[in-house]
Image (cartoon, rainbow, N blue to C red):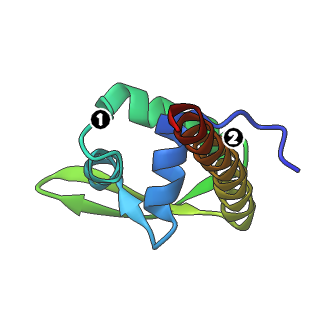
């Protein structure tokens, strides 16, 4: 079990990398899409997160290229990063199932009270 605290922006970065390497601006766009527009990562925040995730062994720089005179780095999820993401998805799934169960109980209780 992971002891890492995964906040939503970190989760979104890891999830964006789950299907392959991406560069920084692509990660910003993916986080926006995955969050349905709720999370807009700033460039500085993203690169600080990538540095931290790299230090934790969750992502690595997997390539570089020069585009219009600027260096573009690509990042990939490591096996450890995939394992942490999997754990977080399962944790979230369990919490969602518990919330759904409680909502169904509530609905039945409200229906029973109204009868």
Badge count: 2
| Image location of residue 108, percent across then percent down | 60, 45
Residue at 53%, 53% in the rendered image: 14
* Horizontal side of residue 100 vs 26, given as left or right: right
Assign a secondary structure to mark 1. loop
In the rendered structure, are the residues bearing label 1 and label 2 in contact, judged by CB atoms less than 8 Å apart? no
**Residue situated in front as seen by the camera: 102 or 85:** 102
Question: Residue most toward the right?
Answer: 1
- Number of the label disc, if any, that sits on residue 55: 2
Query: Could you give the CA–CA distance between mark 1 and mark 2, rounded to whole angstroms?
Result: 27 Å
Q: Considering only vertical position in the picture, is 41 above or below 81?
A: above
* Horizontal side of residue 28 vs 89, given as left or right: left
Mark 1 and mark 2 lie on one chain; the one further toward the N terminus is: 1
Residue at 53%, 41% in the rendered image: 111
Residue at 24%, 41% in the rendered image: 37
Residue at 84%, 38% in the rendered image: 3
**Residue situated in front as seen by the camera: 102 or 47:** 102
Residue 7 falls in image quadrant: top right
**Residue situated in front as seen by the camera: 57 or 29:** 29
Q: Considering only vertical position in the picture, is 64 above or below 29?
A: below
Assign a secondary structure to mark 2. helix
Residue 53 falls in image quadrant: top right
Question: Residue most toward the front?
Answer: 115
Would you name the residue on which mark 1 appears?
38
| Image location of residue 64, percent across then percent down | 38, 62
Q: Residues within 10 Å of mark 2 (few under 14, many from 20)?
A: few
Q: Considering only vertical position in the picture, is 66 above or below 3?
A: below
| Image location of residue 106, percent across then percent down | 60, 37
């Amino acid at each position: 079990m992971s002891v890492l605290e995964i906040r939503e922006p970190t989760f979104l970065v890891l999830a964006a990398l789950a299907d392959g390497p991406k560069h920084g601006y692509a990660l910003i766009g993916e986080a926006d899409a995955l969050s349905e527009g709720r999370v807009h990562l700033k460039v500085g925040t993203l690169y600080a997160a990538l540095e931290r995730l790299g230090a934790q062994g969750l992502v690595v720089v997997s390539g570089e290229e020069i585009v219009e005179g600027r260096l573009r780095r690509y990042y990939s999820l490591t096996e450890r990063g995939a394992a942490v993401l999997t754990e977080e998805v399962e944790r979230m799934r369990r919490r969602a199932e518990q919330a759904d169960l409680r909502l169904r109980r509530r609905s039945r209780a409200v229906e029973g009270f109204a009868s």
